[in-house]
Image (cartoon, grey):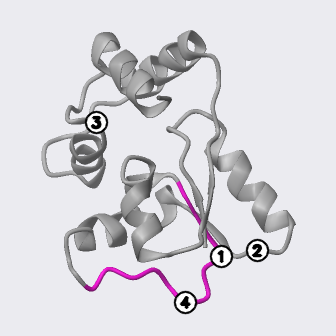
Amino acid sequence: MIFGIGLGRTGTRSLTKALRLMGLNAVHWDNVGAHVLDRWFDSELTLPSDLDAFIEGPFVRWWRAADRLYPNSLFILTTRDKSEWLDSVERWMGRWNPPIGDEWFNRRLFYWGTRRFHRELFSAAWDEHHE
């Protein structure tokens, strides 16, 4: 199994496309996020057996758990300049503030702990992820 563990806005969709061009069955978090999020704490969490790569999503933050669930996996970290990344995330999150209960509201809370952009919080998350 291949896991793309770069934060959103670091080329994760491009990585998904590249892996597909190489003939791999790769999915991006946007396509299966709700399925994984709903079952994340379920002890029976499994990814489809025909899947070669899962890009972004909860495994970005919990890649060690993914490594235990799927031994001998490959992990690809996509990245970009931190300041550019913060600006990109701010634009992306600022375009739309999902209502409470919406799937994207739940994803933002799960992934970031907030539904709104906070530069200091996201800067700290970047630093932690790249240690």
Residue under pointer 1 = 52
Q: Secondary structure at mark 2?
A: loop
- Give how far apart the Cα atoms at labels 4 and 3 are: 29 Å
What separation in Å lies between label 2 and label 3 (alpha carbons)?
Answer: 29 Å
Looking at marks 2 and 3 on the same chain, the residue that comes earlier in the sequence is marked by 2
User: Do labels 1 and 4 touch, CB within 8 Å?
Assistant: no
Secondary-structure class at tag 4: loop
Q: Are marks 3 and 1 in contact (CB under 8 Å)?
A: no
Distance from Cα at disc 2 to Cα at disc 1: 6 Å
**Span highlighted in magenta in the image:** 44-55
- The mark nearer the N terminus, 2 or 1, is 2
**Which label number is shown at residue 33?**
none
Say what amino acid the circle numbered 2 marks.
Answer: Leu
Q: Residue at x 26, y 39 (%)?
A: 98
Q: How far apart are the alpha carbons under marks 4 and 2?
A: 13 Å
Residue bearing the label numbered 2: 24
Q: Which residue is mark 3?
A: 112
What type is the residue that disc 1 sits on? Asp
Q: Tags 2 and 1 in contact by the CB under 8 Å rule?
A: yes
Which badge, 4 or 3, comes first in the chain's sequence? 4
| 48 is higher (above) or lower (below) than 28 | below
The picture places residue 102, in percent across and down from the top left corner, at 22, 51
Q: Front-most of 81 and 108?
A: 81
The residue that mark 4 highlights is: 49
